[in-house]
Amino acid sequence: MKKVLVLGGTRFFGRKLVELLLADGHDVTIVTRGKLANPFVGKVKHLIVNRRDTEAFSKAVEGEYYDIVYDNICYSPNEAKAFCDIFNGKMGKLVFTSTLSTYAADGNAKSEADFDPYTYSIQMGDTEDFTYGEGKRQAEAVFFKYATCPVVAVRFPIVMGIDDYTKRLHFHVKHVVNEEAIGFLNMDAEMSFILAEEAGQFLKWAGLTDVEGPFNATAQGTVSLKDLMALVEKATSKQAKIVLVENDEIRSPYAVPASWYMTTEKAQKEGFVFSKLNDWLPGLVNEIAKQYN
């Protein structure tokens, strides 16, 4: 049994991670700001604190040691450095949820070597000082430089699920059902995705095995935006109104200028077996379509 701390953990793939850890009998503590209800009352210890309040955060974990800490909600180098200042000497391993956004959407398949956090120039700042992708790049660089324990940076693509609170796939289904236009930049662009359940499984694996460093984590295979919208059309029995222009009001959350996907050879060589995108994506689209038809 491991003593585990999860920053986040009340929704989506963070919640899936906690469910998996509890099912395995681990001692789990979650940290949130208390904005959402705790779905694990009586099963986990719940620390309600804002991570940006470093004094309160430090006090909340005073005297504790965690075998594994999962940080799902770090978006800036300042947050990462404050985290290291608080937890160095209090954790055996850190698993940081990073992103495909550390890589440019330039049409090329991305491997871990395409972004090297160990040599990246650090520029301190808060979340609002960076784009999402740059904030994650900076956070990775800080964690790998300043954390005194083994670190894994898990680079996820867009995470999908029936309970996705961002409702990015839902956006497309809803717009097609309502016969509303959707803006894209390149319908031939291919993307990779991962299910929330698999994201939780990978995070658990990354913490409980002895792997270190950056790891891409995505379902096997890609789908073009053209083919994705064909799945939506089939599930809704309606034709999508696609517009190839930039318009923030109608722009798809998946509107990328070129293919944007990653490879997973590194994780596979370490023994993790990923699902196949084509095995579950059509079914997920159909399930979401039931909510709007």
Image: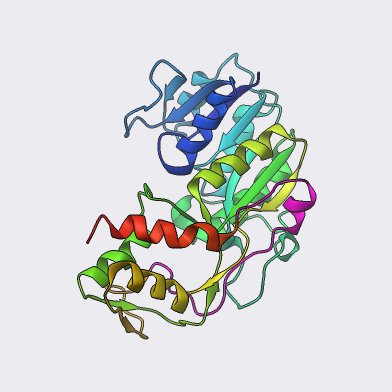
Above or below: residue 54 compared with residue 65: below
Above or below: residue 226 compared with residue 291: below
Q: Is residue 220 magenta?
A: no
- The majority secondary structure of the magenta stretch comes to loop
Residue located 38% across and 32% down the image: 33
The reply to whether residue 13 is in sight is yes
> Residue 23 lies in what quarter of the image?
top right
* Residue 221 appears left or right of 264: left
Q: What span is in magenta?
A: 253-275
Looking at the picture, tell me which residue is in the foreground, 12 or 271: 271
Looking at the picture, tell me which residue is in the foreground, 19 or 243: 19
Above or below: residue 97 compared with residue 68: below
Q: Is residue 264 magenta?
A: yes
Residue located 45% across and 36% down the image: 15
> Residue 226 lies in what quarter of the image?
bottom left
So how many labels did they put on this image? 0
The reply to whether residue 193 is in sight is no
The furthest residue to the left: 178
Looking at the picture, tell me which residue is in the foreground, 279 or 86: 279
Assign the N terminus to one quadrant of the image.
top right
* Picture coordinates of residue 255, whole percent (x, y): 43, 74
The colour scheme applied to this rendered structure is: rainbow
* Picture coordinates of residue 79, whole percent (x, y): 54, 42
Residue located 76% across and 41% down the image: 211
* Picture coordinates of residue 56, whole percent (x, y): 46, 24
Assign the C terminus to one quadrant of the image.
bottom left
Above or below: residue 133 compared with residue 105: above
* Residue 275 appears left or right of 56: right
Residue located 75% across and 58% down the image: 265
